[in-house]
């Protein structure tokens, strides 16, 4: 009698496969850059939900046509009340879906890139002021290019000129009617806005944090001190980059009108003068400042809890 061998066809148990996948996921989650991505995404979620109304009001102010309200100047409060009156309270959160689609992965990409660059180039020492500018600008450039298509959709949602219902539907609509290239409209203006903003922000943020007394940085009030540093850095960075934000908004809302970025610059100046480049400055400064300050504060606290130095 010949005994059949059972070793020729090993059996793969589902339990062992599941355990192997689970182990691989656990190993992946221990990677510091991935932890930085998760921390950044969580901080981006909180700040986006809270400050979306300010972004919507800013976009509406920047795209307001000349002569629409003769004899009166439309400001942030007027636009805020107008949106609530015509679109109800939930209208202030119009565009929050693309904002989430942009900010949750976008902030994660930014912080994971920032962490990776810092660990690679500044493991032994803290970056100088100009090195901090390059560090922040480099991380923001990577995140900005990756998330630009969603940024275009988000801006159009907020402008109130398009009847998109979902982010995916908007992406399909733009690709079919205007071509995929339209999803990258305003790339130059976006990078001219975001890279300097992030670079200037990181520089002021790191420098002001260093100026904090040790009794603050090592106490329970450290998150409050970090938030204050973030607010100061955000105000300065927002004012410097405001003109680029206005140009970016015009190009992304009306890409067919502007073949080049300089065309949008000429139009804004001819239509509104020099002050046109600072339309929406108040709501944008409030939103960018508070969002950045909160994102960095939450990010640093989460990284500290994970045992990583941000």
Image (spheres, grey):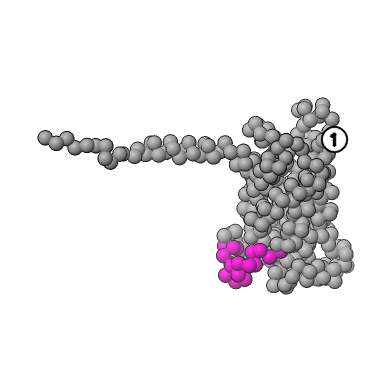
Residue 116 versus residue 98: which sits nearer the camera?
A: 116
Residue 117 versus residue 150: which sits nearer the camera?
A: 117
Residue 253 versus residue 202: which sits nearer the camera?
A: 202
* Disc 1, SS: helix
- Relative to 59, say whether 229 is above or below: above
Kindly give the residue lying farthest to the left in the view shown. Answer: 1
Residue 108 in the image, given as x and y percentages of width and height: 64, 46
Residue 66 in the image, given as x and y percentages of width and height: 82, 69
Q: Is residue 190 left or right of residue 76?
A: left
Q: Is residue 185 magenta?
A: yes
Q: Residue at x 45, y 40 (%)?
A: 21
Residue 257 in the image, given as x and y percentages of width and height: 73, 73
Disc 1 residue crowd, few under 14, some 14–19, many 20+, Cα 10 Å: few
Quarter of the image holding residue 151? Answer: bottom right
Which residue is identified by label 1? Answer: 211
Q: Is residue 217 left or right of residue 146?
A: right
Q: Residue at x 80, y 35 (%)?
A: 225
Q: Is residue 26 visible?
A: yes
Quarter of the image holding residue 207? Answer: top right
Q: Main secondary structure of the magenta part?
A: helix
Q: The C terminus appears in which quarter of the rendering?
A: top right
Q: Residue at x 74, y 54 (%)?
A: 194
Q: Residue at x 64, y 41 (%)?
A: 36
**Image: magenta residue range:** 169-186
Q: Is residue 287 visible?
A: no
């Amino acid at each position: 009698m010949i005994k059949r061998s059972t070793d020729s066809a090993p059996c793969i148990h589902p339990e062992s496969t599941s355990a192997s996948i689970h182990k691989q996921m656990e190993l992946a989650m221990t990677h510091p850059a991935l932890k930085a991505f998760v921390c950044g995404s969580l901080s981006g979620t909180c700040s986006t939900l809270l400050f979306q109304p300010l972004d919507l009001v800013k976009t509406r102010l920047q795209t307001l046509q000349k002569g629409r309200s003769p004899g009166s100047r439309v400001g942030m409060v007027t636009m805020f009340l107008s949106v609530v009156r015509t679109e109800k309270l939930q209208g202030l959160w119009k565009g929050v879906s693309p904002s989430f689609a942009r900010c949750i992965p976008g902030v994660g990409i930014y912080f994971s890139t920032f962490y990776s660059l810092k660990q690679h180039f500044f493991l032994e020492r803290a970056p100088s002021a100009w090195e901090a500018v390059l560090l922040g600008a480099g991380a923001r450039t990577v995140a900005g290019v990756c998330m630009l298509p969603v940024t275009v959709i988000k801006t159009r949602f907020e402008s109130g000129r398009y009847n998109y219902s979902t982010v995916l539907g908007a992406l399909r609509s733009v690709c079919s009617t205007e071509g995929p290239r339209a999803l990258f409209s305003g790339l130059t203006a976006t990078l001219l806005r975001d890279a300097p903003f992030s670079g200037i922000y990181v520089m002021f943020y790191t420098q002001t944090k260093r100026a904090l007394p040790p009794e603050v940085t090592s106490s329970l009030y450290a998150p409050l001190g970090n938030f204050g540093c973030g607010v100061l850095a955000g105000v300065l960075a927002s004012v410097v980059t405001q003109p680029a934000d206005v140009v970016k908004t015009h190009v992304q809302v009306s890409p067919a009108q502007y073949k080049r970025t300089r065309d949008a610059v000429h139009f804004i100046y001819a239509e509104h003068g020099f002050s046109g480049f600072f339309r929406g400055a108040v709501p944008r400064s409030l939103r960018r400042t508070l969002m950045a300050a909160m994102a960095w504060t939450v990010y640093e606290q989460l990284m500290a809890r994970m045992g990583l130095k941000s």
